[in-house]
Image (tube, rainbow, N blue to C red):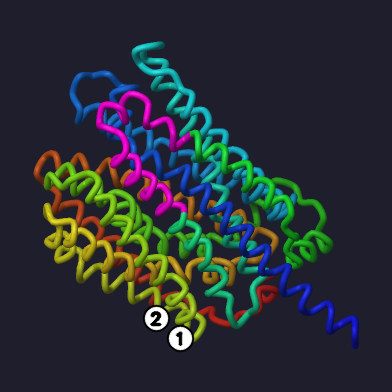
């Protein structure tokens, strides 16, 4: 009796510690990833000296999108590592690569120093980070869903989005601070390097804390039942789960575009299109992202109480209806930017919060991290990574409405997938094996 009384609290503490470890690492990784888009306007000319600011920015955003090309590869590679070597090992390796990518950008030579090779260095750094991020999400969703109490699985598996929010807000907050402290010339000359250097240094802490995590018991059980599988066996099992893979993609495609459009890209868009003060736009963006941070656990708890489908439909239907009105809110006033981002953040949280639980409940333990990684990373690469570039290009040609219509179509697809799929709330994860 005494042993059980001591063991249960110890296990609960260990679960909470592991929950924090995943999300601190996730926050630091997203900080590294998002400082690129926030500071892109300042360092674009340092790597692509075309003489045209828009062309330089588009080239820099193209490199941003190129990082997403590595995400499906990272989803496959790190998913296989997580399913074969363990969730903890995969998550630790991912943060090592993410920090290395930031360090490379921090010390990268400029176009003035090495010519076109500067763009190559930037591209390599983003490809390394893209590989890491492709593996991060699938492994994090898988790990947290597997260690969570069944009745609170959506809440626990939604917590990586808190890491996303904290990391993104940290990057945005640093942008607010630096635009207040440094002049535009100083930011363009050397200031843009500082966030990447900070990201690489705090990555060391993320590596340390993730090395102390416990392994998922479900993964340990699955490996004990089938210690080693050939590539052909894994490929065959992936083929058997193709419907589940398409479900993951269908639920993801609308959310990733909305995320990069409203959560990441909106403050910079307001500056370029409406002449909003750069510092004011970042403050408004920071406050808008804070709404997302509050909404995520609320939506996770609702998904545990109401089911996954109703919460997912709140986003896909709500965003389809409000896409054009939200665009109409934007202007030179930072309060309007905050209001649009706040509404978008609440809707976006309804998409993001249930995903980790849904994905894990759909897929067998043996290939869970691989299928989640491939599905989510592929949708993010094809649609999320290209969203800032597509938005900028269509806006520059006066056809921004086409981009909004594109988002609505994706929301309709996600609505259909959510309606058709089976409700998975409360499912025993071993039942999918």
Q: Nearer the viewer, residue 326 or 32?
A: 32
- Which residue, given by chain and number where applicable, does mark 1 sit on? 306
Circles 1 and 2: CB atoms closer than 8 Å: yes
Residue 194 covered by magenta stretch: yes
Residue 8 in picture, x, y percent from top left: 79, 79
Q: Quadrant of the C terminus?
A: bottom right
Report the residue at 25% width, 58% height from top.
407
Q: Which residues are magenta?
A: 167-196
Residue 271 visible, this angle? yes
Residue 61 can be seen in this image: no
Q: Secondary structure at mark 1?
A: helix
Task: Tell me: 329 left or right of 76.
Answer: left
Helix, strand or loop status at disc 2: helix
Answer left or right for 25 relative to 186. right
Image position of 166 (left or right of 214): left
Q: Which label was assigned to residue 310? A: 2
Q: Residue 60: x, y in percent? A: 32, 31
Label 2 Cα neighbours within 10 Å, binned few <14 / some 14-19 / many ≥20:
some
Q: Nearer the viewer, residue 155 or 68?
A: 155
Q: Is residue 393 above or below residue 421?
A: above
The image shows residue 129 at horizontal and vertical percentages of: 51, 38
- Horizontal arrangement in the rendering, residue 276 relative to residue 110 (left or right): left
The residue drawn where x is 51% and y is 81% is 304
Query: Quadrant location of the N terminus?
Result: bottom right
């Amino acid at each position: 009796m005494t042993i059980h009384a001591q063991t249960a609290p110890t296990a609960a503490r260990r679960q909470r510690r592991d929950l924090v470890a995943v999300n601190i690492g996730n926050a630091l990784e997203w900080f590294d990833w998002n400082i690129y888009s926030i500071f892109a306007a300042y360092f674009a000319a340092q790597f692509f000296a075309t003489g045209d600011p828009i062309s330089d920015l588009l080239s820099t955003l193209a490199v941003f999108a190129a990082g997403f090309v590595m995400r499906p590869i990272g989803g496959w590679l790190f998913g296989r590592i997580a399913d074969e070597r363990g969730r903890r090992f995969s998550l630790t390796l991912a943060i090592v690569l993410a920090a290395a990518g930031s360090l490379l950008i921090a010390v990268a030579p400029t176009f003035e120093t090495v010519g076109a090779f500067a763009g190559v260095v930037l591209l390599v750094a983003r490809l390394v980070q893209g590989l890491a991020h492709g593996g991060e999400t699938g492994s994090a969703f898988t790990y947290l869903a597997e260690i969570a109490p069944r009745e609170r699985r959506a809440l626990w598996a939604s917590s990586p989005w808190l890491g996303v929010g904290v990391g993104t807000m940290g990057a945005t907050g640093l942008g607010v601070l630096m635009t207040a402290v440094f002049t535009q010339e100083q930011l363009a000359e050397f200031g843009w390097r500082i966030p990447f250097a900070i990201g690489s240094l705090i990555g060391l802490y993320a590596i340390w804390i993730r090395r102390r995590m416990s392994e998922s018991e479900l993964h340990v059980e699955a490996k004990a039942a089938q210690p080693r599988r050939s590539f052909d066996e894994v490929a065959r099992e992936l083929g058997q789960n193709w419907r589940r893979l398409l479900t993951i993609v269908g639920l993801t495609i609308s959310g990733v575009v909305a995320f990069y459009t409203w959560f990441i890209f909106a403050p910079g868009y307001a500056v370029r299109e409406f002449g909003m003060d750069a510092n004011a736009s970042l403050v408004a963006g920071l406050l808008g992202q804070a709404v997302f941070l509050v909404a995520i656990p609320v939506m996770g708890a609702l998904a545990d109480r109401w089911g996954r489908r109703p919460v997912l439909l709140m986003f896909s239907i709500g965003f389809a209806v409000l896409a054009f009105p939200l665009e109409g809110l934007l202007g030179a006033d930072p309060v309007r930017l905050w209001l649009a981002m706040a509404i978008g953040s609440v809707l976006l949280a309804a998409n993001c919060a249930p995903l980790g639980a849904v994905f894990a409940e759909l897929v067998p333990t043996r290939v869970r991290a691989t299928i989640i990684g491939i599905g989510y990373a592929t949708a993010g690469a094809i649609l999320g990574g290209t969203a800032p570039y597509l938005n900028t290009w269509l806006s520059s040609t006066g056809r921004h409405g086409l981009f909004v219509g594109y988002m609505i179509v994706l929301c309709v697809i996600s609505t259909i997938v959510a309606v058709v799929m089976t409700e998975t709330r409360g499912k025993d994860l071993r039942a999918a094996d």
